[in-house]
Image: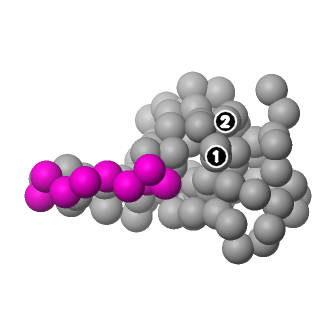
């Protein structure tokens, strides 16, 4: 699988596609500081990005409040799952 959209960060790893999103991970140390990126075009501003730790906190809060989960957050969640499955991020990712 190859990305559909150009992403200009050499530190990022492509992990897959979800609907209209190309999914990327920019690994940092510690792994919980890594960024999860869901890109929707070649244009520089057309992406959603969350630090892994912040994403899990925001997602948890939305779920507990029974708020709707926007599509870009679903794509970001798929990105996190793909990154762990492909061992781009560790399976014991510490987000504490």
Residue at 64 percent across and 63 percent down: it is: 47
Residue indicated by mark 2 = 17
Taking the magenta stretch, the answer to whether it contains residue 60 is no
Judge whether residue 63 can be spotted in this image. yes
Q: Is residue 15 above or below residue 68?
A: above
Percent position of residue 4, x then y: 82, 43
Q: Which residues are magenta?
A: 65-73
Q: Classify mark 1: helix, strand or loop.
A: strand
Number of disc labels = 2
- Place of residue 38 in the rendered image (x, y in percent of width and height, measured from the top left): 61, 53
Compared to residue 90, the image places residue 25 above or below, namely below
Residue occupying image coordinates x 40% and y 64%: 54
Foreground residue among 68 and 51: 68
Dominant secondary structure, magenta: loop
Q: Nearer the viewer, residue 9 or 73?
A: 73
Foreground residue among 37 and 11: 37
Residue on which disc 1 sits: 21
């Amino acid at each position: 699988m190859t990305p559909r959209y150009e992403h200009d960060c050499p530190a990022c790893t492509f992990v897959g596609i979800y609907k209209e999103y190309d999914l990327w991970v920019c690994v940092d140390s510690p792994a919980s500081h890594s960024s999860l990126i869901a890109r929707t075009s070649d244009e520089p501003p057309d992406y959603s990005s969350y630090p892994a730790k912040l994403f899990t906190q925001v997602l948890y809060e939305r779920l507990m409040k029974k708020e709707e989960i926007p599509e870009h957050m679903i794509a970001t969640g798929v990105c996190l799952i793909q990154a762990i499955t492909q061992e781009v991020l560790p399976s014991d990712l510490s987000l504490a």
